[in-house]
Image (spheres, grey):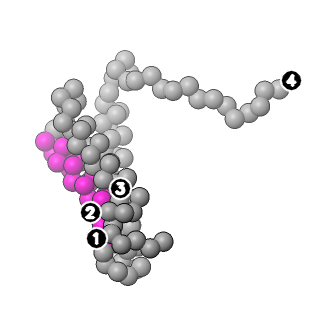
Amino acid sequence: MTYQRFEDLAVWQTAARLYETTEQLLDDSSFSFSPGYRVQLDRAAFSVSNNIAEGSERGATNELLRYIYIVRGSTGEVRSMLAVKELRVPDNLRPPQPCRTSNKTPST
């Protein structure tokens, strides 16, 4: 796939939306975040799109791959931080989980 600008890459666009969503979450007054948690989550989410951009601008496949591995680390950090925060939510305040349907066909 060829591209002219990193902004044209679907993966960068998704990463930019991740950061926008993270900002909305951090700005939501119904959630409580420590200052350190807030700064770290903000930085980790922002680094995803930045590293995609930086890697794609390097011009060499091995450089792009290096930055993609950094992106994987940053997305893991974001997921971990959200998972830890979710563990602290009391069960009675958790939203209901969607019903899971089985892929099995009914027996007759």
Q: Residue at x 83, y 26 (%)?
A: 107
Q: Decide: marks 3, 2 in contact (CB < 8 A)?
A: no
Horizontal side, residue 96 vs residue 35: left or right: right
The amino acid type of the residue labelled 4 equals: Thr
Disc 3 and disc 1: Cα gap in Å?
Answer: 14 Å
Q: Position of residue 59 (x, y in %)?
A: 35, 80
The amino acid type of the residue labelled 1 equals: Glu
Dot 3, how many residues are within 10 Å of its Cα: few (below 14), some (14-19), or many (20+)?
A: some
Disc 3 and disc 2: Cα gap in Å?
Answer: 11 Å
What kind of element bears circle 3? helix
Q: Decide: marks 2, 1 in contact (CB < 8 A)?
A: yes
Mark 2, residue position? 50
Mark 1, residue position? 54
Q: Residue at x 33, y 41 (%)?
A: 82
Instruction: Count every numbered label the image shows and give the total.
Output: 4
Mark 4 and mark 1 lie on one chain; the one further toward the N terminus is 1
Quadrant in the rendering for residue 58: bottom left
Mark 2 and mark 4 lie on one chain; the one further toward the N terminus is 2
Q: Residue at x 33, y 69 (%)?
A: 5
User: Of the residues tagged 4 and 1, which is closer to the observer?
Assistant: 1
Disc 4 and disc 3: Cα gap in Å?
Answer: 47 Å
User: Of the residues tagged 2 and 4, which is closer to the observer?
Assistant: 2
The amino acid type of the residue labelled 2 equals: Asn
Mark 3, residue position? 13
Q: Is residue 103 above or below residue 50?
A: above
